[in-house]
Image: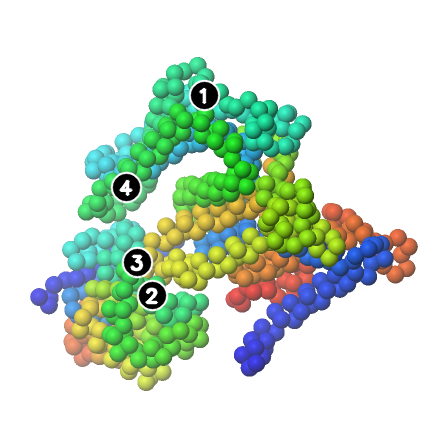
Amino acid sequence: MKNNILLEVQDIQTFIGQFHILQGVNVQVPEGSIVALLGRNGAGKTTTLKSILGLTPPKEGKVVFSGTEIQGRRSYEIADMGIGYVPEHRAIFQDLSVLENLRIAEREKGDLEKKEELIFSLFPDLKRLIMLPGTNLSGGQQQMLAVARALVPDNELLLIDEPSEGLAPVLIEEMMDAIQQLSAETTVLLVEQNFIVASRLAENYVIIEEGHSAKSGKMADLINDQETIRRYLEAA
Amino acid sequence: MKPLLGSFRKNRTLWITLCALIIIFTLGARGLVDNEAVGGERYQDVVITILRGFSTGSIIFLVASGFSIIFGLMNVLNMAHGALFMIGAYVGWTVFVRPDTAVDALVPILLLAGGFFLIPLWDRLLNKLKMPSWLMKTWPWLGLILASVVLIFTLPKYPITSWDVGSYQISPTNYAFAASQGQLVTPEPKQFLGISPLLGLGGILLGGLLAGITVAGFVISRRPATAGTSEGKAFPWETLSLFLAIAILGLVIHYYNTPISNFLLGLDSTLLFILAILVAVGTGALIGILVETTMIRPLYETHIYVLMLTLGVQSIIIEIVRSAWGSPEFTMHRPSIFAGTGEGCPAESLGAILKNNCSTIRVLGGRVRTYNELFIPLLGIVVLVAVWLLLQRTRLGMIVRAGVQDSEMVEALGINVQKIFTTVFALGVGLAAMGGVIGAPSTGLTTTLGDSLLINMLVALAIGGLTSYPGSAAGALIVGLLQQFVIKYGQIGINIPFMEEPFKPTPPLVPALTVFLMVIILLVMPQGLFGRKE
């Protein structure tokens, strides 16, 4: 069934220190789809991803992942249930080689061997660079490695934060192709500032404005809704 | 050639500083050779001083490497590291000199520790009870009081043969030797003081159990209510069997105390030394696990508190050692393999050491002590390589290197970072404790042993770069060499033009000069020799 809800975020409230960052975010991610979190800088999109993973645990509200409540659990347990995370700013491990960056994501020995073919068909560059330390990679290569790393274990859901950030247009195309291809097998929750990228990839969207989810719906409707785009997405 | 040039260009300051250091030490060495005050063979002084520098450096490295990995991974400056080095020395000394006492002490420790291994089991069982929240918050306090009462009643009654400090100082020879000569009365069968053994042993075991339940209670009451329960997890059989194994081991050791003690007292001191190292490393690792899980873990977010906490732990450890061992200075003899003085000694060749177990070897006409000047540096190199392999070639090492950069991301990959933190902390403290035992035969034992080492270690790490593993080795070596050269010049003096008497640096000048070197290096390279530029 395509319309099973894989991830449901219900009214979460997250504090970072004393700051009340998320004040009621609701997100539904149907299985097999790509959902884009949209919104201006500092609206709370990244914090939403981190709250799902428990890196910034929500104080109130629920996060339900394939029927199980996961809020309050330790991050590694949540990730272990089948959630992959691609953080913003290409957070790969600089001191590790490309191979080690992939190996470290293995949950069981041999995970990488099973996914090798998929990863190298999506990002053929990585095969050539496999022994290089992460710090020697270009920005685009690092971003690809960060996505590839999330593909190593069998994840049901990928949380991808700003995959196109700071990439050259050619690489953005390549990255979009890759995400499109891998969405055939996994569900994706995507944070994306670049509306053109988001609108081409995602089927559904959720707009986050000042810490709460303001509007959600089908991407196809949003593209024609100039009023909403102007109100929530264009630079204020 | 090209990559070498490239690396030179990239790390210009590093290479220049290293060259400057080499020149300084060469000048220092030449100074020894040219010195008028030294008669006879002069090169031997240089060789011996360098070897001593390596020796001091190795001990500093054993402590510094663990400290630096812990800091890199967990952002914890563990100021108790020096005290843990010291406790390693004391535990090792006890096993080495009075194994019978160590066996005695092992019984209550095992019985107590057994209870703590059951915590996962209690956690599971208590989770099933649906208690009102006020009860959940209060009952652990009751458990704490109960456990304390039981332990206060039983623990001090446990008979531990204490060493007779007076007689030990009069004849600082080996207790094991004395025992084999019939000079030492081997331990009597153990009698509880005033209570029946069954009650005593049972009480300690019960105290450990109660303490374990209490800890589990505190853990649960602090857990956020939204947290998932442990449903679906397998019943923790392994914790139950671990508890039973440890408790039974404790009882067995209690009832076979005398034969075990006599067996250990009769062992060759080299074997006993190896045992001492193992026990000290194990004790260090256990203390590390205890400190990390109960004290440091709740405070991870606030680094300044952790710093103050570890300072507190340091004082507590020093006071515990003072009350358990008293405050005399102990000496520790070298294991028999490095103590031979008989025929064929000092050895003329490396092969002869192995044959005659000589304590010294002839090098360039001078005598080099095999333990201090050959064994310790060698061990330092072995540990250096072993830890390097662990970091570069194992999954744990890979996770540690990744965690140094971004432990949050490591957790997000599904890796239990807390477990890794605990493992690394235990490993680091274990290495420090090992340094304590290894260093004890040459430095002796005092309760302030750790303090000067802590300073040396911090200086070494500042020189090498705080979180860099090669940096900790290089820094330790530089500090070791510098100290030994200054000490050597303190003995023979430096000829300074226009001064009639040669200038002799006094011992207090040694730490001052180390710090001075650190200041100079930090002025040139603020991140240390091998540190990463921020």
* Crowding near the residue tagged with mark 4, few <14, some 14–19, many ≥20 C-alpha atoms within 10 Å: few
Which residue is the site of mark 2? A103
- Are the residues under badges 3 and 4 in a single subunit? yes
Tell me which numbered mark, 3 or 1, is placed earlier along the sequence.
1
Residue appearing at x 17%, y 62% in the figure: A6
Spatial separation of the CA atoms under disc 4 and disc 1: 32 Å
Judged by depth in the image, the label closer to the viewer, 4 or 1, is 1
Relative image position of residue B317 (x, y in whole percent): 53, 37
Taking B213 as reference, is B31 left or right? right
Which residue is the site of mark 3? B414
Spatial separation of the CA atoms under disc 2 and disc 4: 29 Å
Taking B47 as reference, is B118 left or right? left
* Crowding near the residue tagged with mark 2, few <14, some 14–19, many ≥20 C-alpha atoms within 10 Å: many
Residue appearing at x 63%, y 25% in the figure: B167
Which residue is the site of mark 4? B238
The reply to whether dot 3 and dot 4 touch (C-beta < 8 Å) is: no
Callout 3 amino acid: Gly
> For the N terminus of chain B, which image quadrant?
bottom right
Q: Which mark, by number, is residue B190?
A: 1
Spatial separation of the CA atoms under disc 2 and disc 1: 54 Å
SS for tag 3? loop
* Crowding near the residue tagged with mark 3, few <14, some 14–19, many ≥20 C-alpha atoms within 10 Å: many
Spatial separation of the CA atoms under disc 3 and disc 4: 23 Å
Judged by depth in the image, the label closer to the viewer, 3 or 4, is 4
Quarter location, residue B401 = bottom left
Relative image position of residue B333 (x, y in whole percent): 62, 38
Q: Is residue B531 above or below residue B86?
A: below
Relative image position of residue A111 (x, y in whole percent): 26, 65
Callout 1 amino acid: Lys
Callout 2 amino acid: Arg
